[in-house]
Image: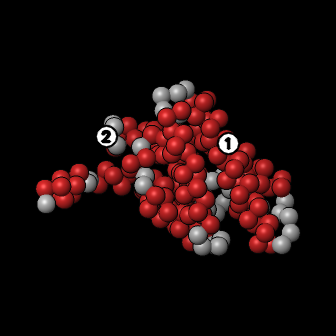
Amino acid sequence: MRAMVARRSEWSPVRLVPTVTLVILAVLTVLPLHVPDYASVAPLLALAGVYYWTIYRPDFAPPLAVFACGIVLDLLDGGPLGVGALLLLLARAAVLPQRRFFVNRLFPFVWMGFTMIAAGAILFLWLLGSGIEGAWLDLRAAMLQWVLTVATFPAVAYFLMRVQRACVPPE
C-alpha cells in the first residue's frame, strides 16, 4: 500500500512537460505554410523532440507518450495511422541504449547522432511511402527533408533545453 502511495506522490504535472512539447512539435511539423510541396519536405520536429528527451530525460518521455505524439502527428498530417507513432517509437528505441554516449557531450556530437537518426527515419519513411505507392518516390524530396530536419535541430534542442531548465527538475 505504501508503495502505491509513494508512486502517486511522485507524479506531478511537470512530468507532462516533455509530452506537451512533443505534441507542440508535432503540430509545428504539419503547420500549413504557403510553400509549394512543403508537406513532402517538412522537417520532422517531433523526431528531434523524441531524440532530445530520450537522451536527457527518458523517464519523462515514456513510450506511451511518444506513441501518443506519433498518433497526433498521424492524425494531423493525414498519413497512414500508426506510421508516425512507429517511427518515433523506433527512434526512441534506437537512441535509448546509446544515450550514455550523448549525455554530457558537446552539442556537435549530439547533433551528429541526430543526423544519423534522422537519416534512418527519413529512409524508413521513403521506403515505406515507395512501397505504398508502388513506385519510387522522389529521393530529392527525402534528401531535402533530411537537410531541413537536421538544420532545424539546433533550434529545437535550444527550445527544449530552455524548457527543461525552466520546468523539469534535474535527475
Q: Position of residue 137 (x, y in %)?
A: 83, 63
Mark seen at residue 116: 1
97 with respect to 165 (left or right): right
Residue 121 location in percent, x, y?
67, 53
- Identify the residue at image location x=65%, y=71%: 79
- SS for callout 1: helix
Residue 98 in picture, x, y percent from top left: 54, 39
Residue at mark 2 to residue at mark 1: CA–CA distance: 29 Å
View extreme (left): residue? 2
Horizontal arrangement in the rendering, residue 40 relative to residue 18 (left or right): right
* Label 1 crowd (10 A; few <14 / some 14-19 / many >=20): few
Residue 45 sits above or below residue 68 on the image: above
The structure residue drawn at horizontal position 58% and vertical position 52%, both measured from the top left corner, is: 91
* Quarter containing the C terminus: top left
| Circles 2, 1 touching at the beta carbon (< 8 Å) | no
Front disc: 2 or 1: 1
Q: Position of residue 62 (x, y in %)?
A: 42, 55
Say which mark, if any, is on residue 1.
none
| Residue visible at 52% across and 67% down in the picture | 72
Q: Which sits in the foreground, 90 or 49?
A: 90
Query: Which badge, 2 or 1, is on the more N-terminal residue?
Result: 1
Provide the residue designation for mark 2.
Answer: 169
Is 50 positioned to the left or the right of 130 in the image? left
Amino acid type of the residue tagged 2 in the rendering: Pro
Residue 47, visible in the rendered structure: no
Q: Is residue 101 above or below residue 19?
A: above
- Quadrant including the N terminus: bottom left
Instruction: Check disc 1 and give the amino acid type.
Output: Met
